[in-house]
């Protein structure tokens, strides 16, 4: 996990003063999923993030915002196997796509829902997604 901490520090992610494990377990209970360890590390130790990573603008919701944002954007109603975790400020959301009780990939998809064929893979894990942007790849590359 040192690698992800170094990457988050590179982009000045603000660390929390207090960890929020109860909120994180509440997210898991509400959506019936187990969050991946690299994403849990982010939620429990860092605040929401809004800035560029590499050349791309990224907004990652904080632990306190996940349930409300997913409800407001109706992500669980449209896709039973996706948990929204943020957006790109251009009409797409970033999500964790679950298959068989584990995260299969990180995706970007339009907020105006069509179907899961519109999901574009942007990482195999939360860390992989951040590293991909850090290395200069764009959303749709």
Image (cartoon, rainbow, N blue to C red):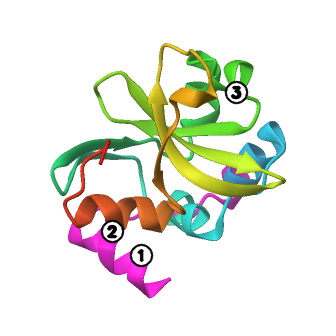
Residue 100 image point, x, y percent: 84, 53
Q: For this view, does 67 lie left or right of residue 30?
A: left
Residue 127 image point, x, y percent: 46, 67
Sort mark 1 into few (<14), some (14-19) or many (20+) by Cα contacts within 10 Å: some
As drawn, the label of residue 4 is 1
Tell whether position 7 is magenta.
yes
Q: Which residues are magenta?
A: 1-23
Q: Residue furthest left?
A: 55
State which mark lies toward you, 2 or 3. 3
Q: Earlier in the sequence, mark 1 or mark 3?
A: 1
The residue drawn where x is 50% and y is 82% is 1
As drawn, the label of residue 79 is 3
Contact, mark 2 vs mark 1 (Cβ under 8 Å):
yes
The one nearer the camera, 42 or 87, is: 87
State which mark lies toward you, 1 or 3. 3
Q: CA distance from mark 2 to mark 3?
A: 29 Å
Q: Helix, strand, or loop for circle 1? A: helix
Q: Helix, strand, or loop for circle 3? A: loop
Q: Earlier in the sequence, mark 2 or mark 3?
A: 2
Q: Helix, strand, or loop for circle 2? A: helix
Q: Does any portion of residue 14 appear in the rendered image?
A: no
The one nearer the camera, 2 or 97, is: 97
As drawn, the label of residue 42 is none
Q: Does any portion of residue 55 appear in the rendered image?
A: yes
Residue that carries the numbered disc 2 in the rendered image: 8
Q: For this view, does 14 lie left or right of residue 55?
A: right
Question: Quadrant of residue 10 in the image?
Answer: bottom left
Q: CA distance from mark 1 to mark 3?
A: 28 Å
Tell whether position 53 is magenta.
no
Sort mark 3 into few (<14), some (14-19) or many (20+) by Cα contacts within 10 Å: some
């Amino acid at each position: 996990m040192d690698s992800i901490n170094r990457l988050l520090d590179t982009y000045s992610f603000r660390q929390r003063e207090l960890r929020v494990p109860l909120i994180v377990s509440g997210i898991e209970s509400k959506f019936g999923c187990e969050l991946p360890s690299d994403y849990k590390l982010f939620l429990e130790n860092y605040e929401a993030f809004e800035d560029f990573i590499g050349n791309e603008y990224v907004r990652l919701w904080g632990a306190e915002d996940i349930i409300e944002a997913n409800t407001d954007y109706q992500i669980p109603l449209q896709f039973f196997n996706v948990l929204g975790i943020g957006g790109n400020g251009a009409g797409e959301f970033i999500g964790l796509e679950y298959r068989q009780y584990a995260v299969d990939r990180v995706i970007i998809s339009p907020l105006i829902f069509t179907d899961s064929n519109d999901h574009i893979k942007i990482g195999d894990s939360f860390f992989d997604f951040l590293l991909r942007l850090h290395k200069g790849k764009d959303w749709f590359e």
